[in-house]
């Protein structure tokens, strides 16, 4: 009888990999799971957004989410934040 041990270094067979891949094709994550994946992303940069008119400040887990909130393209916001550390729009500010 085998005893339980470490699975470090365990390799799946090619046939097992294909079965796993086939089972996951077409899989759609729920919004809750998508949020968890996004929140735990190592590359996501938290961004604070301040609305000039209302004075409200909101924090987003990523540039993409902040850009969606302001209806702006994420790459432009990212470029401004990397170069200047801030984006100053007509009625909204983004900063790290």
Image: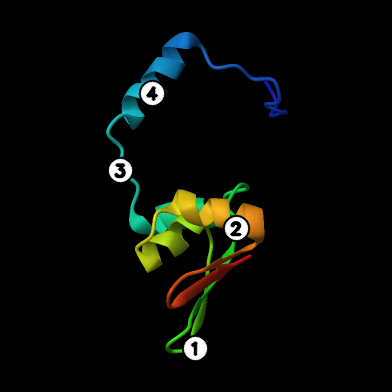
Q: CA distance from mark 1 to mark 2?
A: 20 Å
Up the image or down, 86 lies above or below 44; here it is: below
For disc 3, the marked residue is 28
For disc 2, the marked residue is 81
Q: CA distance from mark 1 to mark 3?
A: 37 Å
- Judging depth in this view, the residue of 35 and 65 nearest the camera is 65
Query: Which residue in the rendered view is the most extreme toward the front?
Result: 90
Secondary element at tag 3: loop
Q: CA distance from mark 2 to mark 4?
A: 38 Å
Q: CA distance from mark 2 to mark 3?
A: 32 Å
Q: Is residue 61 left or right of residue 31?
A: right
Residue occupying image coordinates x 56% and y 56%: 80
Pointer 3 with pointer 4, Cβ within 8 A: no
For disc 4, the marked residue is 21
Where is residue 57? Give x, y as percent.
52, 81
Residue 22: image quadrant is top left
Secondary element at tag 2: helix
Label 1 vs 3, first from the N-terminus:
3
Other residues around mark 2 within 10 Å, as few (<14) / some (14–19) / many (≥20)? some
């Amino acid at each position: 009888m085998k005893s339980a041990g470490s699975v470090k270094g365990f390799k799946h067979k090619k046939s097992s990999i294909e079965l796993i891949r086939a089972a996951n094709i077409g899989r759609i994550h729920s919004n809750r799971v998508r949020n968890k994946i996004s929140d735990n992303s190592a590359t996501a940069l938290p961004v604070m957004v301040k609305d000039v008119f209302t004075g409200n400040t909101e924090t987003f887990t990523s540039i993409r989410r902040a850009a969606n909130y302001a209806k702006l393209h994420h790459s432009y916001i990212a470029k401004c934040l990397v170069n200047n550390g801030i984006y100053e729009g007509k009625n909204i500010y983004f900063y790290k």
